[in-house]
Image (spheres, rainbow, N blue to C red):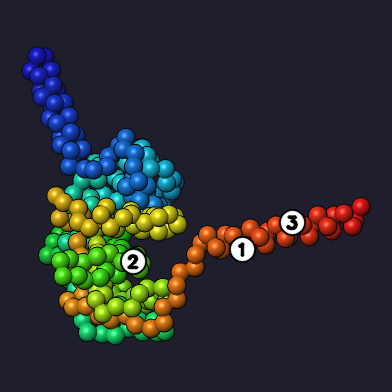
Amino acid sequence: MRKTILVLLISGLFLLSLAFALSAQARVAIGSRSEEVKAIQEILKSDPEVYPEGYVTGYFGPLTEKAIKKLQKKCGLPETGVIDEATEKCIYPIGYQIKITFPNGGEVWDKSQIWTITWQVMPPLETTTPSQEGVKIRPFWAKVSIDLFKKTEASTVFVRHIATTNLFDQSYSWKIASNIPNSKDYIIRISSGPGVGPIWYREKAGQELPSPGEIWPVPPRPYYIVWDESDEPFEITGEVKPVPNLEEVISILEKMLAELQRAINLLKGMSQ
């Protein structure tokens, strides 16, 4: 009897330590509440079989845990419900290498035309499921962030987020905004990894995007977001249209509203 109790105690301690170890590896787990959880929930709800409830609350509760377990099963992983490193590789395109092919230096892009950004994708060496050896898998959510940067002598400076699109499309057509200043020092950066999730979620929700400092780089997790840039700068040229002064626009709209209100009051007086 004592041996049985001892074995049960040891087993319990082992399972408890395993649970703590799994939680320690994960940034988000049961009980977590954050913007990152919202992004993960939005990703999960893209497949009704995985997350039929589709709640995007930012709270990692039992329903989110259940969805993660379903996803882990699809990837042949232990169904822990914890987003550890192996689960992240099931969700995101971690380990995939990107090579920008156009623009890659020396091109001249006029704002009057639509330009197509292109890239190559090299898969990681390990792209099989642990339980189904030889079965090739693709990440559940294979999004990349395409961004415009400006090259300086010291570094590269973020200019504008262009789009979040599918890694495996390997191309994206872009109409350059007229208010982007003309310059010969632009480069394109394409980023992938878990760090793209919050960008995509905020973009989808119509919220302000994360600042560049929140995205590039994010040590000490080198795979959290990885990227490739144009080898050399390219030029953007064409007519530059200034951004309208919002205060002036608001002032004009307020005057129009006041005139409209006076007209309404006049019509009301005539109808009495």
Residue 109 in the image: state x and y as whole percent.
Answer: 32, 83
At x 32%, y 35%, the residue is: 31
- Indicate the quadrant containing the N terminus: top left, top right, bottom left or bottom right: top left
Q: Toward which corner of the image does residue 190 lie, by quadrant?
A: bottom left
Residue 124 in the image: state x and y as whole percent.
Answer: 15, 65
Q: Nearer the viewer, mark 1 or mark 3?
A: 1
Question: What whole-number distance in Å separates the C-alpha atoms at marks 1 and 3?
Answer: 14 Å
Q: Viewer-proximal residue, 152 or 165?
A: 152
Residue labelled with disc 3: 261
Assign a secondary structure to mark 3. Answer: helix
Assign a secondary structure to mark 1. Answer: helix
At x 61%, y 63%, the residue is: 252
Q: Which mark is residue 160?
A: 2
In the image as oriented, which residue stretches furthest toward the right?
272
At x 25%, y 54%, the residue is: 213
Residue labelled with disc 1: 252
Establish if 71 lies above or below 232. above
Residue 228 in the image: state x and y as whole percent.
Answer: 19, 69
At x 34%, y 42%, the residue is: 34
Tell me the crowding category of disc 2: few under 14, some 14 to 19, or many 20 or more residues within 10 angstroms, Cα based: few
In the image as oriented, which residue stretches furthest toward the top?
2
Q: Is residue 98 visible?
A: no
Q: Viewer-proximal residue, 126 or 148?
A: 148
10 left or right of 236 in image: left
206 left or right of 62 in image: right
Tell me the kind of residue under disc 3: Gln
Tell me the kind of residue under disc 1: Ile
